Amino acid sequence: MSSESPDSAEFSESDVAEIAVDGRVIARLADIDDLSQSPADEAAAIRMIRQILDDSTEEFEEEHGMSPTEALEKAEPDIQMGNETRGWDSIPVDALTEDH
């Protein structure tokens, strides 16, 4: 596990967040406010993201023979999330593996 903050790939806007695992940026999430014109726009985005997560979870379980939660508990990686405004925050693995 790395205790150093990852190199920021692209923090050009405060509405962009990056996720890093063991010091490597692995994902970038962007909220494009000016594209959302109605509650239906936001609802569609939420449902599509949820569907992507459900499909990805199913594929992960088939490929690895365990759930994403089990994989995180086993690997105990250093996970961080950051954006231009807040910088990097460490995310405890147990916060991601608890059933909510």
Image (spheres, helix red, strand yellow):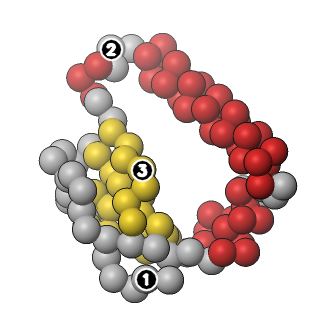
| Rendered residue at 35%/54% (across/down) | 18
The answer for how far apart the CA atoms under marks 2 and 1 are is 41 Å
Task: Residue under label 2, please give it.
Answer: 37
32 lies above or below 28: above
Task: Residue under label 1, please give it.
Answer: 2
Task: Residue under label 3, please give it.
Answer: 27
The answer for how far apart the CA atoms under marks 2 and 3 are is 26 Å
The answer for how far apart the CA atoms under marks 3 and 1 are is 17 Å
Q: Are marks 2 and 3 in contact (CB under 8 Å)?
A: no
| Rendered residue at 73%/75% (across/down) | 74
Q: Are marks 3 and 1 in contact (CB under 8 Å)?
A: no
Q: Position of residue 84 (x, y in %)?
A: 20, 57
N-term-proximal mark, 2 vs 3: 3
Q: Position of residue 56 (x, y in %)?
A: 66, 39
SS for dot 3 = strand
State the residue in front, 59 or 37.
59
Q: Tell me which amino acid carries mark 2.
A: Gln
Q: Tell me which amino acid carries mark 3.
A: Ala
